[in-house]
Structures are given as structure tokens and as C-alpha cells.
């Protein structure tokens, strides 16, 4: 009888421990799934891009650009003034000259814009 009671106690303990370990295993699996599960998130908002409006010129004063909030611009190179329109493309501004730009220059150009400056054909112009 003692042996039967002992076997009953041992089997009950084993069953109890086994069910606990299965429960722990299920919890661990659920935790791992939760860690690797991809949750949809809202896309990051792009940082505010600098406004190109204003006048930029090089340190010598030989080249300047003035951007207007209407999408128009004027540029001056050694006393010759040209006009056109600008369009924002990320950190760049695409320029389209009204009458072909400066002498022997293409009718479009790209200007990289930063905070308080632009870069045109390698030249940095400040506001």
C-alpha cells in the first residue's frame, strides 16, 4: 500500500511538473513570436525641408539667385539677369530658365539646397 501511495504521489508530481513546463514553453514561444512579429507603424514624417525663398549670393557677389514663393526665380551672373521657374525635388531645386539661361548654358539646372545656403555648379551661395 505504501508503494502504491508512493507511486501515486510520484506520478501526480510528474504530471504536475510536466504541465507546468509545457505552459512555460508555450509562454516562451508566445514571447518569441511577439518579439519577431512586425506591427504596422505609421511612416516617419520627413523632416521639414528648408524653404528656398530668398536671395543667395557667392562671397564675390558675381553670382546670385533670388527664389520667390510663387515658384519663380531670378539669377544674376556678372551683371546679366535671367528669369525662370523652380520646382522642389527633395533637397534639390530644379531650375527651368525662361529663355535658355545664361549664354551657352542649358535651359535647366539643379541646385542643392541647405539651411541658409544653396550649391550651384559647385559654388556655395549664402542667404
Image (spheres, helix red, strand yellow):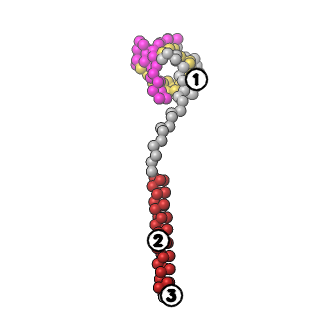
The magenta-colored residue range is: 79-107
Q: Quadrant of the C terminus?
A: top right
The front one of 117 and 11 is 11
Point out residue 86 in the picture as x, y percentages from the top left corner.
46, 19
- Identify the residue at image location x=48%, y=41%: 41
Please tell me whether mark 3 sits on a helix, a strand or a loop. Answer: helix
- Identify the residue at image location x=43%, y=18%: 96
Q: Are marks 1 and 2 in contact (CB under 8 Å)?
A: no
The residue that label 2 is drawn on is 18
Q: Give the CA distance from mark 1 to mark 2.
A: 74 Å
Please tell me whether mark 1 sits on a helix, a strand or a loop. Answer: strand
For marks 1 and 3, give the one nearer the viewer: 3
Confirm whether the magenta stretch covers residue 102: yes
Q: Give the CA distance from mark 2 to mark 3.
A: 24 Å
Q: Are marks 2 and 3 in contact (CB under 8 Å)?
A: no
Point out residue 35 in the picture as x, y percentages from the top left corner.
48, 53
Confirm whether the magenta stretch covers residue 38: no
Q: Are marks 1 and 3 in contact (CB under 8 Å)?
A: no
Point out residue 3 in the picture as x, y percentages from the top left corner.
48, 87
Point out the tag, 2 or 3, that comes first from the N-terminus: 3
Give the crowd class for mark 1: few <14, some 14-19, many >=20 residues within 10 Å.
some
Give the crowd class for mark 2: few <14, some 14-19, many >=20 residues within 10 Å.
few
The residue that label 3 is drawn on is 2
- Identify the residue at image location x=47%, y=69%: 19
Point out residue 29 in the picture as x, y percentages from the top left corner.
45, 60
For marks 1 and 2, give the one nearer the viewer: 2
Image mark for residue 126: 1
The front one of 76 and 13 is 13
Height in image: 31 above or below 78?
Answer: below
Please tell me whether mark 2 sits on a helix, a strand or a loop. Answer: helix
Point out the tag, 1 or 2, that comes first from the N-terminus: 2
Amino acid at each position: 500500500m505504501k508503494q502504491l501511495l508512493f507511486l501515486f504521489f510520484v506520478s501526480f508530481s510528474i504530471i504536475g511538473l510536466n504541465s507546468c513546463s509545457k505552459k512555460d514553453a508555450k509562454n516562451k514561444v508566445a514571447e518569441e513570436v511577439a518579439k519577431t512579429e512586425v506591427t504596422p507603424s505609421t511612416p516617419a514624417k520627413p523632416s521639414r525641408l528648408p524653404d528656398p525663398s530668398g536671395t543667395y549670393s557667392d562671397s564675390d557677389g558675381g553670382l546670385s539667385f533670388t527664389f520667390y514663393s510663387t515658384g519663380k526665380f531670378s539669377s544674376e551672373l556678372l551683371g546679366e539677369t535671367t528669369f525662370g521657374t523652380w520646382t522642389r525635388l527633395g533637397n534639390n531645386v530644379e531650375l527651368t530658365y525662361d529663355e535658355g539661361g545664361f549664354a551657352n548654358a542649358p535651359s535647366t539646372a539643379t541646385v542643392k539646397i541647405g539651411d541658409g545656403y544653396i550649391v550651384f555648379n559647385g559654388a556655395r551661395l549664402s542667404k
